[in-house]
Image (cartoon, helix red, strand yellow):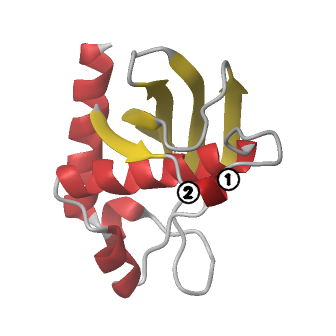
Amino acid sequence: MNEIALRVRYSETDAMGVVHHANYIRWFEVGRTEYLRSVGINYAQMERDGVYAPILRVEVEYKRPAAYDDEVIIQTRVLSFAQLRLRFGYRVLNMRRELLCEGLTVQAFVGRDLNPINPYKAIPDAVALMLKCAEKDKADG
């Protein structure tokens, strides 16, 4: 699992003064990118190598709001890597460690032509790291 802290920017809030729901999905992307970077996978380099991982599914369950200038913690973990799909789980907490939302994303692997590719062949080193992360995150609960 990886954690990263962010401060809510004014532009991320809505007319009610709370974080707009779509921003949590943007924060999931921040968490995912930083998670991959922390284990030695550079997503930008994967794209330069012609491998993309588009989102196939997003699920979010909102528990309580965050507001402008709050600090939030994004926890990210690999839930599974199987059948050529990568599943990440997310939890967004406030600084009191209260759950604000949780969710997941499912990603596939495609080439520049947007056709599915086998990541085991295209990016074997990154796949090995992702499998290792999935095992570790599963063991950690």
Would residue 72 appear left or right of 128 to someone viewing this image? right
Would residue 129 appear left or right of 138 to someone viewing this image? left
Tell me the amino acid under the disc marked 1: Leu
Q: Which x, y percent locates residue 129?
A: 21, 49
Q: Measured along the vertical axis of the image, is residue 19 above or below residue 47? A: above
Q: Residue at x 49, y 72 (%)?
A: 52
Tell me the amino acid under the disc marked 2: Ala
Q: Which residue is mark 2?
A: 108
For the question of whether residue 84 can be seen, the reply is: no
Q: Which x, y percent locates residue 82?
A: 46, 39
Q: Mark 1–mark 2 contact, CB under 8 Å?
A: yes
Element under disc 1: strand
For the question of whether residue 112 can be seen, the reply is: yes
- Mark 1–mark 2 distance (CA, rounded to whole Å): 7 Å
Q: Nearer the viewer, residue 130 or 62?
A: 62
Q: Nearer the viewer, residue 22 or 129?
A: 22
Q: Measured along the vertical axis of the image, is residue 89 above or below residue 48? A: above
Q: Which residue is mark 1?
A: 56
Please report whichever mark, 1 or 2, sits nearer to the chain's N-terminal start.
1
Element under disc 2: loop
* Quadrant of the rendering where the N terminus is positioned: top left
Q: Residue at x 68, y 32 (%)?
A: 60
Q: Which x, y percent locates residue 24?
A: 61, 43
